[in-house]
Image (cartoon, grey):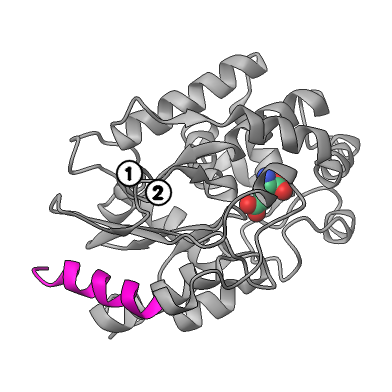
Amino acid sequence: MADLQATLDSIYSDILPRIGEGKVADYIPELAKVDPRQFGMAIVTVDGQVFRVGDADIAFSIQSISKVFTLTLALGKVGEGLWKRVGREPSGSAFNSIVQLEHESGIPRNPFINAGAIAVTDVVMAGHAPREAIGELLRFVRYLADDESIAIDDKVARSETQTGYRNVALANFMRAYRNLDHPVDHVLGVYFHQCALAMSCEQLARAGLFLAARGSNPMTGHSVVSPKRARRINALMLTCGHYDGSGDFAYHVGLPGKSGVGGGIFAVAPGIASIAVWSPGLNKVGNSQLGALALEMLAARTGWSVFGD
Ligand code: GLU
């Protein structure tokens, strides 16, 4: 691992001339204000080394990457029963597609498209008022990353609450199909706050390290999930983690990962390291353009693809 810093530095210098490529998400007004000319990357290895480059310490809106954390919480609460509420297949449709949800009678295709994540949030809320559920999620992420400074960006949460019309439609649809137990505005209140979690690349790589290390965080000693559950969450990220760009991401990068419209991508090299990259400019399917490129370079330069080197 000695030359991992050199690998990160080489990726950074190859990316720099292209900085600013892609288009920031503008359907959430607060995200439209983010300067696209930023790039950060962090790697945390299972033996506890941390490598960083660029803007790796700047907190950004993790958006859909939060779906990995709520999925982990929901599986902890209801186990395999979760799969009555949501499927496990790639969607092949946009992350906020309504058509697919109607076709499939209110059971979303997977936990990483918006409808699926909203159903997962509904599961996490059982027995909690919305405010408590948000608190539980925040505590969980701080515990995973071993970092009490992680916070929710209220401006982003408010901005999305005011403009998240499609998510309101998806949630109402699921409620009509009885796949939502709580009132739509309560579930969306929690969902918008989870998406508004602000984390840096380093915090994110630390928080997700358990997925690279058979369910336990070797830096904190915390056992988070069983090895089997970690493997399965990774499988879902590999097949469903990048909207309808998931196949392309597996082809080019070959690592389980989850992206968010804030421009972050979290990825896992099982048994080796967790990785987070952030660059706000998105490609056509909503994944960070330079983030995906940087991960492709990393996989090529380290041989970490799960499909072989
Ligand atoms: N909060 C965003 C939404 O629901 C998350 C989208 C994403 O990152 O994919 O629209």
Specify few, some or many for label 1: CA neighbours under 10 Å numbering under 14, 14-19, or 20 or more: some
Q: Residue at x 37, y 27 (%)?
A: 149
How far across and down, in percent of the image, does residue 3 sit? 12, 72
How far across and down, in percent of the image, does residue 159 sit? 73, 35
Does 298 sit above or below residue 226?
below
How far across and down, in percent of the image, does residue 204 sit? 38, 46
The residue under label 1 is 226
Q: Is mark 2 within 8 Å of ligand 1?
A: no
CB under 8 Å between callouts 2 and 1? Answer: yes
**Taking 308 as reference, is 251 left or right?**
right
Query: Which SS class for mark 1?
Result: loop
Is residue 53 among what the camera can see? yes
Q: Report the magenta residues as a range.
A: 1-15
The residue under label 2 is 229
Tell me the kind of residue under disc 2.
Answer: Arg
Residue 11 falls in image quadrant: bottom left
Is residue 86 among what the camera can see? no
Q: Residue at x 62, y 71 (%)?
A: 22
Q: Is residue 227 magenta?
A: no
